[in-house]
Amino acid sequence: LEANAFAAEPLFFPESVFNKQAFTEAVALAFSRCVWLRSPDADLPALVPMLDLANHADTPNAQIKLKPASKGGLFGGKAEPPMAQLVALVDIAQGEPITLSYAESTRAELLIDYGFLQEPVPAEWVTTFSLDEDDINFDDKCDVLGSAGLEPSQQFVLSEKGELPAELIAFLRVKFLKGADAFLLEALFRESVWREHLLLPVSQGNEEEALNAGIVRCGEVLRKFESSLQEDLALLAEAPRASLEYKLAALRYAERRAAEASQRAFKGRLAELSSLEYYQERRLRSLNLTPIETEEELDALREESARAAGRGIGQDYEW
């Protein structure tokens, strides 16, 4: 923008008014004042004076909906333009503040987009995983993810408490699905592959790659923190609560705890690989067949097969 517009046409865009700092502030102001209009087709950001005065709440008592335009009818129906409507979600008492959900955002995203930090700050962090576009099975994997309501590049929220999101683990299984495991991408399995197979371990190799990807991502996030845990704790104890330094330290402290907990969870699951039941074992069990895992079990099977054939072990025949 600076090179193609501001610098290229200084008479139309004087530097005293049109510069990177001014543009950044204008975008931030517009974004922080916009509201989301809910409609059946999509949620749209818009600047709506007066309605933008409502504060954010995790559990709001109202929402803004987009009423589509009406063309009118043959028998006198009045045409109306599209309009934003403030709709109560619950009974609101007189004098009670009206609140909206600005977006399904983390505390960090609310601070970046709207300039405030809502406390308490939960220990959570956000990461995005994406399919490899050069994957030979990219289109099939997109279809599988689409059946579960996920995108090829999907954001996940991980918390210090609770299990790793099942959708995240399943997404990573899809991402690393290849070789002998890729048969699950066939159209035959399309309707059931996510629900019946990908929410469970597929193979030991696939599970190992998926979990290692999570461990690597956690390590990358933790290495990006420029301040130490001790420095953040000192800021939380000494900095004014309304200061940006305090807010950023609170976010870093919460995100660091969540990322460390996620890393431990990924490593814990990785240590259990040998005890998990994979697709082949589940399939054999569904057919009332027991997989052969030891040499003793194989010898017993040979002996049973020989008895069923009506001869002893080692008996020779002349054909």
Image (tube, helix red, strand yellow):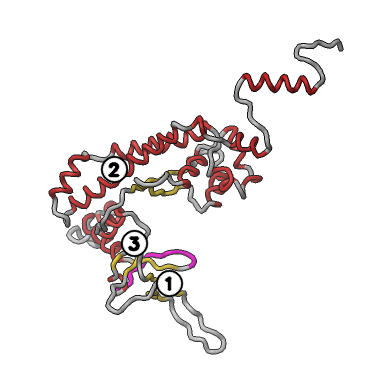
Q: Quadrant of residue 226?
A: top left
Residue reaching furthest to the right: 319
Mark positioned earlier in the residue sequence (3 or 2) = 3
Question: Which residue carries the number 2 mark?
Answer: 256
Question: Which residue carries the number 3 mark?
Answer: 58
**For the residue labelled by badge 3, is the local secondary structure a helix, a strand or a loop?**
loop
How many neighbours does mark 3 have within 10 angstroms: few (below 14), some (14-19), or many (20 or more)? few
**For the residue labelled by badge 1, is the local secondary structure a helix, a strand or a loop?**
strand
**Which amino acid type is shown beneath numbered disc 1?**
Leu
- Front residue of 224/251: it is 251
**For the residue labelled by badge 2, is the local secondary structure a helix, a strand or a loop?**
helix
Q: Quadrant of residue 73?
A: bottom right
- As drawn, 214 above or below 96: above
Total marks shown come to 3
Q: Residue at x 29, y 70 (%)?
A: 54
Q: CA distance from mark 1 to mark 3?
A: 21 Å
Magenta span: 40-49
Residue 234 visible in this rendered orientation of the protein: yes
Q: Residue at x 18, y 48 (%)?
A: 236
Residue 8 visible in this rendered orientation of the protein: no
Q: Residue at x 39, y 75 (%)?
A: 85
Q: What is the quadrant of the N terminus in the image?
A: bottom left
How many neighbours does mark 1 have within 10 angstroms: few (below 14), some (14-19), or many (20 or more)? some
Question: Which residue carries the number 1 mark?
Answer: 66
- As drawn, 168 above or below 310: below
Q: Nearer the viewer, mark 2 or mark 1?
A: 2
Mark positioned earlier in the residue sequence (1 or 3) = 3
